[in-house]
Amino acid sequence: MKSQKKLSFIEEARRNQIMTCAIEIISSRGYAQASLAQIAKEAGISKGVISYHFSSKDDLIEQIVSDLYESGSTFMTPYLAAQTTALGWINTYIEKNVLFMKSHRKHVIAVTEIIFHARDEEGKPRHFRNIDTDATINVLVKMLHRGTMEGDFREFTDFSARVLAATIRSAIDGLSFQLAASLDLDLDAYAKELVTIFQMAARKV
């Protein structure tokens, strides 16, 4: 990553422009087509301008991924903090995740492309610092156990809670593929159906 000095308004605007153009190319043409030359052409600038703001394509890609996850966290946090029960928390977690993906469609598609196709120097899938699926699942597991204590959910073992938590996360992550395949997907209905499925799986019988 380039220097951590505070960016000027113009520098910040240029970085955002470059990232937006990279997201456009990756989401519409695929990760393999997102060379610095193509990104520069899309932005109407030279490759040298990109190199001034990002040390490498890897640096640019890292920032695109980080920006999505940081934006998602900023969006989700106040909604989740306002919930007073585990049931409300998980319902909100599902609904607002889908809402965020709806409003950041191209960015979500681009990051999905990146995650599945970016490789490190050894040819292995790249690890991105903002992605910690295990931590997310652990939070969901805790909420499922809390919901049991509050009387809203059935009894869970640690194993069964982890299975359901992983299923919730996978259902949300899997939406990114459908975003790319179906432009007219009804995301509001999708969110409601996911909440219904979750409630049926977690409810007391």
Image: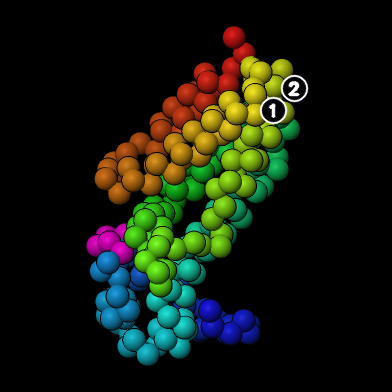
122 displayed left or right of 40: right
Q: In what quadrant of the picture does the C terminus appear?
A: top right
Instruction: Say which element carries label 1.
Output: helix
Where residue 80 is drawn, which disc sits there? none
Quick check: can you spot residue 91?
A: no
> Compared to 6, does 189 lie above or below?
above
Helix, strand or loop for the magenta stretch, by majority: helix
Question: Which residue is farthest front?
Answer: 122
Task: Give, as a three-letter code, the residue at label 1.
Answer: His
Q: Position of residue 14 (x, y in %)?
A: 45, 80
Residue ID at (49%, 33%): 167
Give the left or right position of residue 125, taking residue 69 as reference: left
Q: Is residue 135 depicted above or below 122 in this figure?
A: above
Residue at image point 66% right, 18% down: 155
Residue identifier under label 2: 149
Of 185 and 180, nearer the camera is 180
Q: Are marks 2 and 1 in contact (CB under 8 Å)?
A: yes
Q: Amino acid at mark 2?
A: Met
Q: Element at badge 2?
A: helix
Name of the residue lying farthest toward the top: 205
Q: CA distance from mark 2 to mark 1?
A: 6 Å
How far across and down, in percent of the image, does residue 173 sit? 44, 44
Name the foreground residue: 82 vs 178: 178
Q: Does the magenta segment cover residue 149?
A: no
- Residue on which disc 1 sits: 145
Mark 1: few/some/many CA within 10 Å (<14, 14-19, 20+):
some
- Residue for point 50% across, 39% down: 169
Query: Does the stretch in magenta take in 30?
Result: yes
Region in magenta: 27-31
Where in the figure is residue 146, as x and y percent of width and height? Answer: 72, 28
